[in-house]
Every structure is written in structure tokens, then in C-alpha cells.
Image (tube, grey):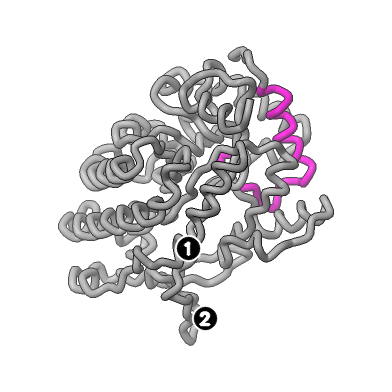
Amino acid sequence: MTSRERVRMALSHQQPDRVPVDLWGSASRIHTEKYKEIAGEKGLDIREEDRLRPGKTTEYVDYRISDLVGSDFRHINIREPENFAVYYDEDGNEYDEWGIGRKLYQGFKAITVNPLADMEMDTLKKHRWPDTADAGRIRGLGAITKDWYENTDYAITATSAISGVVFENCQYLCGTENFLMALYEDEDYVDALVDKMTELNIEMHLNYLKDIGDYCEWVEFTEDFASQSGLLISPELFRRFFKKGHIELFKAIKRQHPNIKIWFHSCGSVRQLIPELIDCGIDILNGLQPLARNMDSFELKKEFGDQVVFHGGIDIQHAVPGTLEEVEAEARTRIAAFAPGGGYIFAPSNHIVGDVPNENFFKLYESARQYGRYPIGGR
């Protein structure tokens, strides 16, 4: 069975020969320094051609490592715009095309400037937004995707075009406290900003996908609506401010590419929101953070397994940085929970970071191959 066939069976809630495995997706990358460490251990040179995401905390996408762990995927990454370059102010803040300023702290870029922090409608109306049609974003992607589709057996996906989609990006623009307070105190402002962000997301994704979408199994969205202990906003606030826009976004994509599926990531205890996300039109749910509150893998499979495909779910907080025995047990547990009957793709619940020993990283995928053969029993 080819990788593409294997993934398509999983997406159809059927049992393939084994559970498909993923690496280098929107929530399964390797942090830059950890990637260099792994590559060095395996004698792989660090190639500039693999640095597809310059300036991010996960800069590299190296399919030589995919092949080492038996990944079934290749992922398209949107490119940088040609008509914008990051710039700096006198305080050393680095500004992106959204006007958001950041500084590097302990290896991570932290937001230091929120361009809409005054929460004034006039500032919102005058704000300079990214050029969603910038040709540089998609230059060459169609040829790469077509080549992969015609000359390999990998399943192909489109990674996130706008990290944070609407909810997170509104916080980046306004500041988290400002935006969350506005949900209660200034509904008109929130409606205007959410409408604008939805419009930009639709434009960006239709442009991004126009040459690649017909070759892709799914397109990825990353938007955190939850913390370790619960939702960041109530289901009622999600329905009031965000549901309509997400439905419009996903429908617009499926009108342009009827066969593409919607993959959605949220960290944390998102269980209460899963019915709303399904109603919005998601097909694949990623994150599934097992140590978060009310995110028991077996319960999620029982409650939602006939409505969505599960992707990820591997505990990177405790198990993957732990002992080799804990890594093996974790892989075995998540496969037992999510894989029976199909509808599961094996991946970490988020990126591999510096506290994960190299041998644990490889043990994780080795265990997926060992325990992911069908038929699989439950708990």
C-alpha cells in the first residue's frame, strides 16, 4: 500500500495496513536547534534549500528525516511575499507585514508591539494590511506540488498560510487583554476586526491554494482556543463572534477545491468546542493534547470518532521528553485509543523542542511502526 493510499483510507475512516505517520506539518515540525542536532547526529548537512521558514522558530523542513522515520507526507509551505521585507525600529523591534513587532527572548520571538492596541475604529480602518495576492507567496508551488503528486506516492498537504487564523491574530494585533475585554465591551469593534481578518484569510487561502489545492489531501489551520485547563473563550462567545467567519472561510475553500479537507489545530482543553468546530466544517482535528483537562484520548474517540479524523495526540509535555519506555508506552496508548476502525494519523501534539532527546524522537516513530499495524485493539 502506498503512503497516499494509506492516508486516504484513514481519512475515509477505514483501516489501512498501518497507521499513517506525519512529520513537518503545521504542528509537527522540529525546532531549529533540535533539528540541527538531529541532522548532525545522522551525518546530514544543513542545506539552505531546506530553510523554508526563515525567521521562524521552526525554520527547516528536511525530508531526509521524514524518510528516516517513515513519514507518509510531503507538505507545501507558503512562501514569503516579494513586496515586503521585515524592518526594525530604534528599539530593536522586528516588524512583520501585519505591523506586529517582536523581539527574540530565549530562542522564541515574543510580541512586543501591538499595532491596534488603542482599540480605535479609526486606527483599524487606516491600518495597512498584507497584500494577500503577492505573487511571491505562491511562486513555484504549483510545479512542486504537481511533481510530488505525479512522481511520488506521498500524501500532500498545504500547511497553514496564516498562523493564528482569526482569534489569535486579533490578539497579536490588539494585545490579548485588550481584545478579550472588547468581546464584552466593544462588540462593534470586534465584529469589524473579525470581519476584516476573515476577509483576508479567504483571500490569502484562495490565492495560496489555486495552483496546489487539487493535489492536496487537506489544508491546515492553526488557532489556539484553549489552555491546559479550559477554553480561552466560552462556546457562546465563539458562536457570537467567530463561527460565522470560520464557516465562510472553509466553504470558500471547498467551493474552489471540492475534494480538499479542512485540518484544524488547537492546543489545550478544547473538548467543549469540538462540536462547534465540526459544525464549522473541519474534517481533521489536531492537537488532542492528552494531559490537558477533559482530553482523554479514548473518550474523544468514542464521542467524536465517527465525525472527525484525529491527527496527533502524542504527549510532548511529559512522555516524549521522558524515558524510552515512556515514549514507547505513549505511542502504544495513543494508537490504541485513536486508531481502531481507522480515522487516525500518528504525529506529536505539537512541535518537537529542545528537551526531547534525539533517541526519543526516533523511538517515537519506531514505536508507531511497531504498534500501528492493523488490526489494532482498543484499551
State the SS at label 2. loop
Residue 74 placement: quadrant = top right
Name the residue tied to disc 1: 139
> Where is residue 62 shown, x and y percent of the image?
67, 53
Name the residue tied to disc 2: 92
Write the residue at 48% across / 57% down. Answer: 78
Q: Is residue 100 above or below residue 252?
A: below
Q: Is residue 125 above or below residue 167?
A: below
- Check whether the beta carbons of the residues at disc 1 and disc 2 lie within 8 A of each other: no
Q: Is residue 376 above or below residue 80?
A: above
Binning the other alpha carbons within 10 Å of mark 1 as few (below 14), some (14 to 19) or many (20 upward) gives: some
Q: Quadrant of the C terminus?
A: top right
Q: Quadrant of the N terminus?
A: top right
Viewer can see residue 285: yes
- How many numbered marks are there? 2
> Where is residue 303 shown, x and y percent of the image?
41, 20
Write the residue at 55% across / 53% down. Answer: 144
